[in-house]
Amino acid sequence: MASVPVHYPWFKKEDTNAFFALFQNNIANFVIIAITMLGFGFPESIVFGQVIPGAAVAVLVGNLYYAWYAARVARREGRTDVTALSYGISTPVMFVFLFGVLLPAKEFTDDPQMAWRIAVAACFLSGLVEVCVSVIGNWVQRNLPRAAMLGALAGVALTFIAGQMLFTTYEMPVVGLIVLGVIIVGIIGQVHMPFRIPASLFAIVLGTGLAYLLGQAEVASITEGLEHFGFYPLLPTFDWFDGFVYLFGAMAGILTVVLPITIYNAIETMNNVEAMDAEGDRYDVRECQAVDGVGTMLGALFGGVFPTTVYIASVGAKWMGAGRGYSILNGVVYLFAAMFGLVAALAEIVPVAVVAPLLVFVGVSMISTAFRGNEQRYFPAVVIGMLPYFGNYLSTNFGNDAAEVLEGVSAGIVPLAEGAMFTGILLAAITVFIIDRDFWRATLFAGIAAVFSFIGITHAGEMAWNAAPDFTIGYLIMGALFTFYAVTGYGLAPSGTREQPGGE
C-alpha cells in the first residue's frame, strides 16, 4: 500500500498520561534493580555508573525507534491515531537476571566487578539470540492462536501488574484509594480533571502531596534520594568481554537460564505486538523482535545487564489515546534521569502506593484486550492461558522457600510455575484447537508440551534430559486422547450444530 500524507503529531495531550504510566513502570523496575544489586554487594559505581546508564541507552534507542516505526505505520495507513509501542525491561526477565545470573555470578566469583562482566556478557548474548529468533517470529505468530498469546499475557497482567499493584495500593489505603479513584474517574471514566490536567499527573501530584501531609511518607526519604545525585556519563565499555570466558567456561550453567528466558522475552514481544494488533495497530513481529535484540546488545555495550522488550503497557497507552510523543519523551527523560542520578531521587520522593493505581489500570487494560480481541467462543482458552501465572506469582514471591511453603497448599504449584508462559500458551492453544475441532493440531501442541517438559523448559527447576518425566508422560497421554478423536471423530456433533463452550 502506498504511503498516504498525514499529519501525525510529534506530541499531543494524551501522550502525557501514557508517558507517566510508562516512565513510572520503568522507574519501579530500576529502583528494584538498584536496591537488589546494592543488597547483593555490588558497589554504587557499578549500579549507578554502569547498569542504570546502560539500561537508559537501551530504553532511549528502543523508544526512539518505535516512535519512528509508529510514524511509518501512520503514513502507510493514512491514520493519525497510531500508538507507538512501549519499550522497557520485562519484570519477569528482570527477576531472572537478578537472581539467576547476577547473584550466582557474584557468589561464584566473590568479585562484583567480574560478576557484572559475566552478566553483561549474558545480556549481550541474550540480545544476539533474540535477533536470531526474530527470523521465525512471523511464522510463530501465524501458527499460534491469538487467544493463546493474549491469554498468557493476561496472566502476567492479572498477577504481576494489576493484582500486585492493587495489593500495593491497599498498603497505604488513605492515599492509594484516592489515587485509584482519580484513575478510575479520569482515565477509565474519561472525566476531565481540574484545569484539564492529565489524570495520571493529577493523581501523582495529589497522592504524593497527601502522603507527606498525612505523614504516610517520610521526608527523610527525599534526603536519601538526593544523595545519589551526580553525573554518570554514558560511555561504551569493553571491559566485560572477559565475562564470556566464564560464561562459556566455569559458569556455563547460566546459559540454561539465559536461553529459555530469551525465548520467553521474544514471545513476550510477540504477545504484546499481537495485543496491539487486536487494538488496530499492526506492527511486524519479526522487526520488533530484532529491534529488541539490538537494543539489548546496545545497552550491554554501555554496561546494561537486562534484556529489553516491547512492553505490556502498549495497550494501556493505546487506550489513553497516545501517539508517539510519549515514547520519545520517555526515552529522553529517562536518559537524563539516569545520567544525573534522578532515578533514585524520584523513586524515593514518590511513594510506591501513589504509582501503583496507575499500573493497576495498565494491567486491567491488558486483560480486557485479551477478551475483546477474541471471539466469545475462545474465552475459555484465554482463561486457561492465564491460570499458570497464579502458580508463577506464588512461587516468585516465596522465593527459594516456595517448594516447602507451597507443598501444603498443592504439590502442583511449583512445577506449574516453572515455564508458566510456555505452559499457558500451549494449554490455551490446545483449547483453541479443540474448540475448532482441529484435533491433529491439538495433538501436535500436546507433543510440543511433552518435549518442553522432557528437556526442562517447563515444570522443572532447570534444563536437563528427562527433567519432568511425569509431565512428559501426561502430555503424551493427552496427545493420544486427541489422536483418538482425530482418527475416529467419535462423539463429535454434526457441523453447524455444536454448542458454545460451557453451554447446557
Image (cartoon, grey):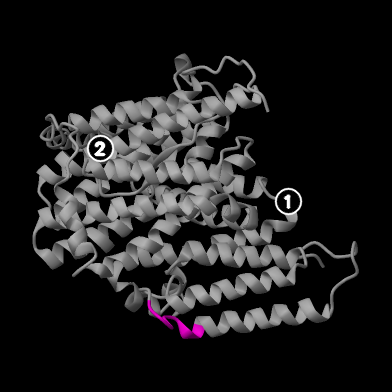
SS at mark 2 in the image: helix
Q: Position of residue 440 (x, y in %)?
A: 72, 72
The relative height of residue 30 versus residue 41 in the rendered view (above or below) is above
Q: Amino acid at mark 2?
A: Ala
Which residue shows up at 13% across the image and 45% down it? Answer: 46
Which residue shows up at 9% across the image and 48% down it? Answer: 43
Q: Quadrant of the N terminus?
A: top right
Q: Nearer the viewer, mark 2 or mark 1?
A: 1
Is there any visible trace of residue 206 in the rendered image? no
Viewed as shown, does residue 278 lie left or right of 272? right
Q: Which residues are magenta?
A: 464-470
The relative height of residue 308 versus residue 185 in the rendered view (above or below) is below
Is 131 covered by the magenta stretch?
A: no
Is 468 covered by the magenta stretch?
A: yes
Along the line of sight, the residue nearer the viewer: 445 or 222: 445
The relative height of residue 130 versus residue 331 in the rendered view (above or below) is below
Q: Amino acid at mark 1?
A: Glu
Q: Position of residue 265 (x, y in %)?
A: 43, 53
Along the line of sight, the residue nearer the viewer: 7 or 216: 7
Which residue shows up at 56% across the image and 38% down it? Answer: 283
Q: Are marks 2 and 1 in contact (CB under 8 Å)?
A: no
**Which residue is tagged 1?**
375
